Image: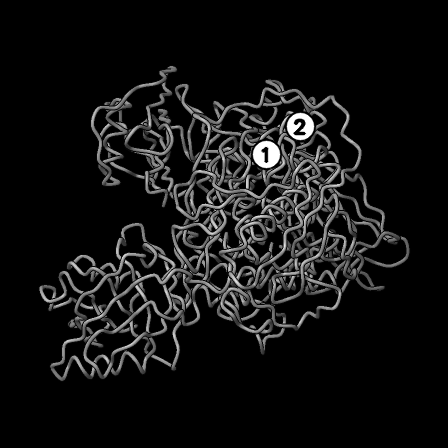
Amino acid sequence: MKKLFSSLWFISLVAWGFGQTDLTAVQQYLQQHASQWNLKSTDFANLEFVSSASSNAPGTKHLKIRQTKNGFPVENGFGIVTVKNQEVVHVTSNFVPVTANPANQPVLSAEDAVKKALDHLSLPHTTLKLLKNDHNSFLFAKEGYSKEDIPVKLVLGNNNGQLLYLWDLSIYPLNSEHWWSLRLNAQTGEVIFQNDWISHCSFEHCEEEAHANTQQPFRSPPPPPGADQYLVYALPLISPAHGNRSMIVNPSDQLFSPYGWHDTDGVMGDEYTITRGNNVYASDDIDDDDIPGYSPDGGAALDFDFPYDSAVGVQGNLDVVITNLFYMNNMMHDIWAHYGFDEESGNFQEMNYSGAGLGQDFVYADAQDGSGTNNANFGTPPDGQNPRMQMYLWTSNNVPDLLSVNAPASLAGSYSCSTAGFGPPVPFTPITEDVVLVLDDGTDPNDGCGVISNGAAISGKIALVRRGSCTFAQKVEACQNLGAVAVIVMNNTGTGTQAMGGSSSTVTIPSIMISKPNGDAFVTQIQGGTTINATIVNPGDLTATDSDLDNMIIAHEYGHGISTRLVGGADLADCLYNEEQMGEGWSDWFGLMLTQTAADQAGDGRGVGTYVINEPNNGTGIRPAPYSTDFAINGYTYANTNSQALTMPHGIGFVWATMLWDLNWALIEEYGFDPNLKTGTGGNNMAMKLVIEGLKLTACEPGFVDGRDGILVADELLYNGAHKCLIWKTFARRGLGYSADQGSSDDRSDQVEAFDLPQECTLGLQENKQSSLQVFPNPSNGVLTIKHANEGIQSVELIDLSGKTVLQQSVSGNEIRVEISSLKKGLYLLKVLSEKGYEVIRVEKL
């Protein structure tokens, strides 16, 4: 388990223009404090400055520092060093032991490494074409293997305590379902790390390599306010079920989109009149080729006022849905830039006007993507490469005519079904075959979760399987492996169906769900010896709803990009893959924050996705419970993350978002609600600042404790710790208290919840600005002299900024001396008990 080192230490840095002198100062500091991370000073013998991220705290930067050895970067050895007023105030450590020499030698060539990776991914290949050879960095042509050219570099990495030479590469398979980041043992070719940059989604375009943005900060003055207008479901509206569209005029942010939403060069004059610009390119991808398709055109006036034709459904209203998708992507860009997701921190823009960070990475937003249904996704490669958002049609509520029974006559006719969020969509070409009931050796012999015994009968047929103890994807894949051409899943409860969630990179056959009564009738006929013949086909319009019109879902998907770029730094997209990571939770929270209103109450139930699944606005949505501070509505706590009943990562993320939603309301109760999403001063705006700053301070491969501690440190930076006890109490209410233990962040079953608070918050301690105490010298490098003006001192206690008591002693007298030389450098609260009572002041150990 990684622990944040959250005491405040001080070391002078020379200037913001980070140079070798600054790096040397940081290196000296890290070497002096190496033991805090169970490392040696020699582990910091060679460091490199990677990048910086901005902070909303004045005079503050987050500097990413990476370890190197033998001239090679240690890919997973880095830390975020936070500097405030040219002093180191915090270190988020992902540093690793690198003192020992590498345990292997690079034997494989870069080409061999790519071939090994292609074999590992079961991708065909022949001879590779080398495009670039720059020392230990290579680029191979994409033809026939990948949608993008394949970058390969030789790095070092710490794997299970051993330092190894590794080939680091990424491959984007032609099916667009994944964009794999891999590291292979440079001697054996063994894949020791694999991560999908796509949260169940795919990409279309990126530059050959992430490269520095050489553009200069813009010099041309921004144009006057424009007259561009968009008829959309404007924030805080969630969806068509929550209200009507309204006309939004000139919505671009003057600070973060200074040339409007259709500019790409930082010079007055729009480059595009379609739904394309510096932040996003929104178009349809109905044919699933990952090439931008149709985009509505607003003309020279940029007038995106399109009527909705209810007679043809969402599929006949591309102008409307793509305009809304364009609007929401731009709003996400502009709003969250105010809180710290800006150019320097790795946001998504074609041109970075300030010259900070990497450009050429606007979002490709695909409306009504043809690669699936009942889902949406976002893929985030490192800074300088384009992310992709895929928005799907939703068919979850009993779509008619997907299934027709041809025989026997007693069952003949059409049946309403739901579809799956994995595998291919139901095809337009009919699949007509006999239906065969799956038999297996499990507790339920028809749920396909045990060893299937009638594989020969299933081959070439439509498999019929009951919903049961394994995932939908597992049972469909099991039938596919035995030769089934499609799968019908029978619900095992109620009288309806539900969208089948899940993910799979290997399912290649369609699957649908029928209701339990219909499934029981099918089983009765088959077990009685009757053959059922059926047809599965897409009748043309599978949807009643479209996630392109659900602002909360769009915000959720874009939120994946924010959390991926901010945790661990924008140059790395491999920090949110471990079992306890909270990416789905942050994403839900992004959607909740932008769609709350002044009329909302803390105890209200907020469902996610109610529109797309045709639930009432007060429905549960697609999460285990609505979001609410009321335990009668949402009683989930940290311990629930251990339960297999909660899916990973969505269920685990749901618990994290529940805690963040509670924090939002705790701050609103203290400071009120402000509907100004960009520059408001309400408790909701403070929550937004704390979470974005906290993301930059959260350890790579985080657990809940890491995320909580990041927010606590953010409060120290932004508000001088003013909300520390409010934050502690909010998290402790859901079991993430002072003694909570996340165990291994890569084990989703070892979390220990606790509801306690640090002693400082239990006692309600606050620094007494008009204390009767005199403390000198303060700061001190060894001895504090404490004098009370009127009363005798009875005891003293020092409490660090995490709330832990680090020194306690009984004393007597009006003036006493306390030895603190053994304590770590940083700030402490000095708690003094006299006959008058407790008094607390802040002291500093040099």
- Residue 824 percent location from the top left of the image: 62, 41
Secondary structure of residue under mark 1: loop
- Residue 173 percent location from the top left of the image: 32, 38
Tag shown at residue 353:
2
Question: Type of residue at label 1?
Answer: Gln
Instruction: Place residue 63 in its image quadrant.
Output: top right
Image quarter where the C terminus lies is top right
Q: Nearer the viewer, residue 773 or 730?
A: 730
- Mark 2 vs mark 1, CA separation in Å: 9 Å
Which residue in the rendered view is the most extreme toward the right?
A: 790
**Residues at badges 2 and 1 in contact (C-beta under 8 Å)?**
yes
Secondary structure of residue under mark 2: loop
Q: Nearer the viewer, residue 532 or 602?
A: 532
Instruction: Place residue 57 in its image quadrant.
Output: top right
Q: Nearer the viewer, residue 267 or 80?
A: 267
Side of 568 relative to 678 (left or right) = left
Side of 830 relative to 581 (left or right) = right
Residue at the location (39% across, 54% down)?
372
Judge whether 520 appears above or below 286 on screen: below
- Residue 376 percent location from the top left of the image: 47, 54
Side of 559 relative to 234 (left or right) = left
Label 2, residues with CA under 10 Å away: few <14, some 14-19, many ≥20 = many
Can residue 684 be seen at all in this image of the molecule? Answer: yes
Q: Nearer the viewer, residue 431 or 495?
A: 431
Residue assigned mark 1: 349
Instruction: Place residue 500 in its image quadrant.
Output: bottom left
* Number of marks: 2
Judge whether 429 appears above or below 630 on screen: above
Question: Type of residue at label 2?
Answer: Tyr
Can residue 720 be seen at all in this image of the molecule? Answer: no
Side of 221 relative to 150 (left or right) = right
- Residue 118 percent location from the top left of the image: 25, 35
